[in-house]
Image (spheres, helix red, strand yellow):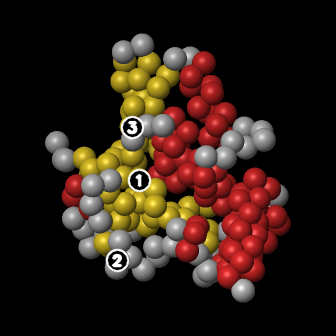
Amino acid sequence: MDKKVELKVVGLSGMAAQEGAYMLVLQEVDGERQISIVTGAYEAQAVALRVKGIAPERPLTHDLFTTFASAFNIKLKETYIYKMEDGMFFSYLCFEQNGEIIQVEARVSDSIPLALCFGSPIHISEDILNGKDVHTKSSHPAFAPLNYTEDATLKAALKNAVDTEQFEFAAILRNELLRREAEAKKQK
């Protein structure tokens, strides 16, 4: 069996070239290797809320699924990104219910927010991390945590979030922009 490496979310940024798309950056827990995953606005919103520790006013789809699973004593043991083919990642969710293990194929863009909702680990195959599409933190072309994303990118993402009625995500982006404005005023 292939060695598994645990990942953590380290960055999320809007993609200027593709409206409504976001770049999610994951890094190995005890190392520097990173992968980038393109995700949609709703999945990015779910990730951003969880990473920032913000509970949405009303449950999002990933929160609803987590609540549903808990009601039936289903636990997410791990998310496992097991394959990369033609630039696309493949993953499965490993659930446990009453001692029985069930694996379910899932899009990586859904698997990661679910792992964050359940508080379960995200693993990736060592073979993928040894591949050509992996970068180190210092060399990653898309590395852009919310705190370091350019104002123009945040403003464009904010407009998109409002236009698509993703108000919780819009609030995160607005708050980051307001924080930056306040900090800039202090420095004057």
Residue 97, how many percent across, how many down?
A: 44, 18
The residue depicted at 48 percent of the width and 41 percent of the height is 115
- Cα–Cα span, label 3 and label 1: 13 Å
Judge whether 135 appears above or below 168 on screen.
Answer: below
Residue position for label 2:
138
Residue 132, how many percent across, how many down?
A: 26, 73
Residue position for label 1:
8
**The residue under label 1 is which amino acid type?**
Lys
Judge whether 140 appears above or below 61 on screen.
Answer: below
- Cα–Cα span, label 2 and label 1: 16 Å
Image quadrant where one finds the N terminus: top left
Q: Name the mark nearer the viewer: 3 or 2.
A: 2
Residue position for label 3:
78
Image quadrant where one finds the C terminus: bottom right
Q: Earlier in the sequence, mark 2 or mark 1?
A: 1
- Cα–Cα span, label 3 and label 2: 28 Å
Q: Earlier in the sequence, mark 3 or mark 2?
A: 3
